[in-house]
Image: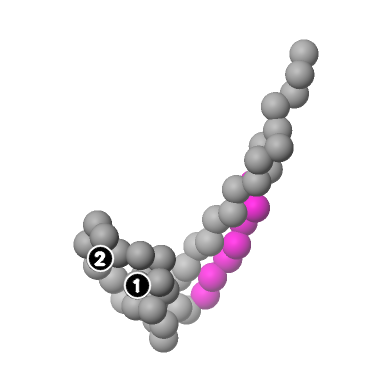
Amino acid sequence: MHRYFFKLYARDTLLSFDENATKHDIEKAMTGHILDQAEFLGIYSRTRS
């Protein structure tokens, strides 16, 4: 079984990053700009026949 976590953010501004941006860089830039957020969990498992 595999679990996939997704986070969706509604922001009040457009943010730009270069290809070397880390998760920390992005989270820091979003501080104060998040209007709302949602989290989704997807589960996948292969059924054996």
**Image quadrant in which you'd find residue 43:** top right
Q: Is residue 3 above or below residue 37?
A: above
Query: In front here: 3 or 6?
Result: 3
Which residue lies under the disc numbered 1?
25
Within 10 angstroms of label 2, few (less than 14), some, or many (20 or more) residues? Answer: few
Q: Is residue 27 magenta?
A: no
Seen from the viewer's position, the closer of residues 9 and 22 is 22
Residue that carries the numbered disc 2 in the rendered image: 17
> At x 60% / y 48%, what residue is drawn?
4
Query: Which amino acid type corresponds to the residue marked 2 in the rendered image?
Result: Phe
Position of 43 relative to 37 (above/below): above
Element carrying mark 2: loop
* Region in magenta: 36-42
C-alpha gap between disc 1 and disc 2: 9 Å
User: Quick check: marks 1 and 2 in contact, CB under 8 Å?
Assistant: yes
**Image disc number at residue 33:** none
As rendered, which of 5 and 11 lies closer to the eye? 5
Residue 3 lies, in percent from the top left, at 65, 46
> Label 1: how many residues lie within 10 Å, few (<14), some (14-19) or many (20+)?
few
Dot 1 falls on a residue whose secondary structure is helix
